[in-house]
Amino acid sequence: VSDLLKNIVALSHEFGTPEFVKGGGGNTSAKNGETLWIKPSGTTLAGLQEGNFVAVDRKALGALYAMDVPPDAAAREAKVKDLMMAAICGGSRGRPSVETPLHDIFRATYVVHTHAVLVNGMTCGSAGRVQAARLFPDALWLPYIDPGFTLSMAVRVAVSKYESEHGHQPNTIFLENHGIFVAGDTPEEIHAVYGQVLDTLRGYYAEQGIPLTLARSEAVVSRDIETLMHWPDVGAVVPGGRFKVVRGPLTPDHMVYAKAYPFDQSLSDDARVTFISRHGYAPRVVITPNGVYAIGKNEAKARLALELSLDGSLVAQLAAGFGGVQLMSDDARRFIESWEVESYRENQLSVTRTAESA
Ligand SMILES: [Zn+2]
């Protein structure tokens, strides 16, 4: 057990860099026959230590697959959360990641799930699925599915179908408009799979003539900052320079930290109020003729919004190599917007706290 935890901490730190995840995104796990150790909600991969992992009883977790599924999404996720909390082993603390059942599906010892930007250029591309089948014939591709229990059940069905056809489980799963799961019995296997995936993608982008860094002009300090600082609930404004902000929902993480839509009107009070009544939230990312600004209650939140907005912009740039960017559907966006309130707020708060204390 001590080796398992040591290895998963090392993997978490290695794959907890901005190349792979932003904010509290992504999650990792290690397991033996009885127990699954998973990253808790509200933590960052880079900050994980051995004592942070939540130990979950795999047999108790199995109750999820046999439960009567409530038709209402909120009731369903609440029931899943209760079942997961009940599966936590004595002496262990923290709330298991919503993606815990997904980790349990893999028989492999280690699972590392990230939102790697190079990968999301493909998973957010309209031709991503077709190209993935060609570039990664042994990987499994899943169309976009609401995260949480629904996604876990869909992955379970897809993995068992894959296994009946191939005689073994997949070690790579691409999730459309979301990210990648990699499973392996040793840290070396995880490294090898990620290495192969990223090398293949780098080669593909090079072939397509697509640069791997974002086209962006330097941040300018303008009067806009002063104006934005006077907006209600704004405690920090971070200038990001000029870059092409994605106008719409790209992945759940981009939505959670930067919101689906940026504000691009004149900085008047009327326009701000109209935006809020149309979208149901205050903007996090503001586009003016002087450049892009991220705003938030505090500096950590504003920085995170900018980070995700920049990441989204790079994803869109890369997705040009995969037929152009494909946004999430309105239904998918609405699920995240309402789900965020239930499940993600806590996560975001503690991530902000982590970022502030670091
Ligand atoms: Zn994820």
Image (cartoon, rainbow, N blue to C red):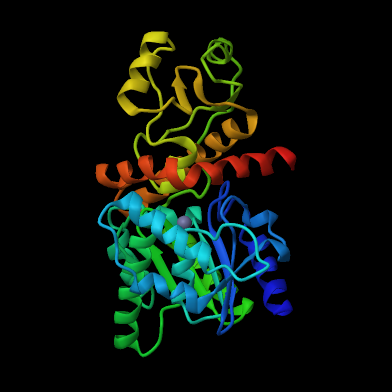
In the image, is 252 to the left or to the right of 87? Answer: left
Q: Position of residue 350 (x, y in %)?
A: 62, 44
In the rendered view, tell whether residue 32 sits above or below residue 45: below
Q: Nearer the viewer, residue 262 or 321?
A: 262
Q: Which residue is at 32% across, 43% downward?
A: 333
| Residue at the limit of the structure toward the bottom, as seen here | 167
Which quarter of the image is occupied by the N terminus?
Answer: bottom right
- Is residue 47 visible to us here? yes
Which quarter of the image is occupied by the C terminus?
Answer: top right
- Is residue 327 visible to us here? no
In the rendered view, tell whether residue 166 sits above or below residue 17: below
> What is the number of callouts on the image?
0
Q: Nearer the viewer, residue 90 or 28?
A: 90
**Image quarter for residue 47?**
bottom right
In the image, is 353 to the left or to the right of 25? Answer: right
In the image, is 121 to the left or to the right of 89? Answer: left
In the rendered view, tell whether residue 48 sits above or below residue 67: above
Q: Which residue is at 47% across, 36% downward?
A: 258
Q: Nearer the viewer, residue 238 or 132?
A: 238
In the image, is 112 to the left or to the right of 178? Answer: right
Q: Position of residue 20 (x, y in %)?
A: 56, 56
Q: Position of residue 310 (x, y in %)?
A: 51, 39
Q: Position of residue 233 (x, y in %)?
A: 54, 20
Q: Which residue is at 41% across, 47% downward?
A: 252
